[in-house]
Amino acid sequence: MTEFLTTWLWENKIELIGALLGLLYIYFSIKQHILTWPTGLFTSLLYIVVFFQSGFYADMGLQVYYVAISIYGWYFWLKGGKKNSVGHQKKLPARKTQIKLLLNLLLVTILIYAGLLFILLNFTNSTVPYMDSLTTALSITATWMLAKKYIEHWLIWIFADLFSAGLYVYKGLWPTVILFLVYSVMAVLGYIEWKKDLKEQN
């Protein structure tokens, strides 16, 4: 049993390290800490490998996007806040998404989904193209909203994480299944925490 466990841990070391870093990433996101972004960057680099080996090509491409958005989010959280009276940078506050922007994001998400689906159906051997495209499109939108500190991104994550957990059960990626179930719970906590922050601002 010990030998089997040791072998399994060694064979899945990249996924396990990525899962642990992923938990740290969500924790820092909830706390609105700048370490959200470097942690997310390293998590994404590891999951590029995991998803390539598992044939989740849209999710692999999503991790490449995460690398880029992590760099952007890192910069925006540092520089996007207003300056105070003595010229020091203030912390970027959480905010609500306006209806017009929500509608634009919905349209963009649908277009991303359609584009990803076309690519997966015609140019890959993806086994779950419809579901893979959906979770990827939602994740792209939600991560951009996180970079801009829009609170509603947590609601997208709750749905996307639960849906993704079901996909990874199908693929047998059990550490990632557990990770995404925990993500779902943490997304609920994140929404509650950011809502408190919004009330304090008001």
Image: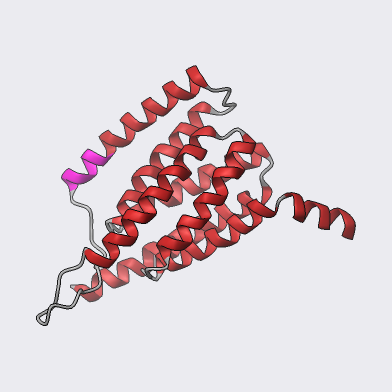
- Residue 149: quadrant of the picture: bottom left
Point 56% across, 29% down: residue:
128
- Residue 188: quadrant of the picture: bottom left
**Res. 146 in view:** no
Eyeballing the image, is 104 above or below 151?
above
Quadrant of image for the N terminus? bottom right
Point 50% across, 32% down: residue:
131
Point 47% across, 37% down: residue:
61
Q: Residue 43 vs residue 83: left or right?
A: right
* Residue 21, position as x, y percentages in the image: 55, 61
Residue that lies at the very extreme toward the top in this rendered image: 122
Eyeballing the image, is 164 above or below 119?
below
Eyeballing the image, is 36 above or below 99?
below
* Residue 88, position as x, y percentages in the image: 18, 78
Residue that lies at the very extreme toward the bottom in this rendered image: 86
Quadrant of image for the C terminus? bottom left
- Residue 82: quadrant of the picture: bottom left
Provide the major secondary structure of the magenta segment.
helix
For the magenta stretch, what is the residue range?
A: 99-105
**Res. 199 in view:** yes
Query: Along the line of sight, which residue is nearer the eye, 4 or 151?
Result: 4
Residue that lies at the very extreme toward the left in this rendered image: 85
Point 58% across, 22% down: residue:
125
Q: Residue 130 vs residue 149: left or right?
A: right
Q: Residue 136 vs residue 167: left or right?
A: left
Residue 53 lies in the magenta-colored region? no
* Residue 3, position as x, y percentages in the image: 89, 57
Residue 103 lies in the magenta-colored region? yes
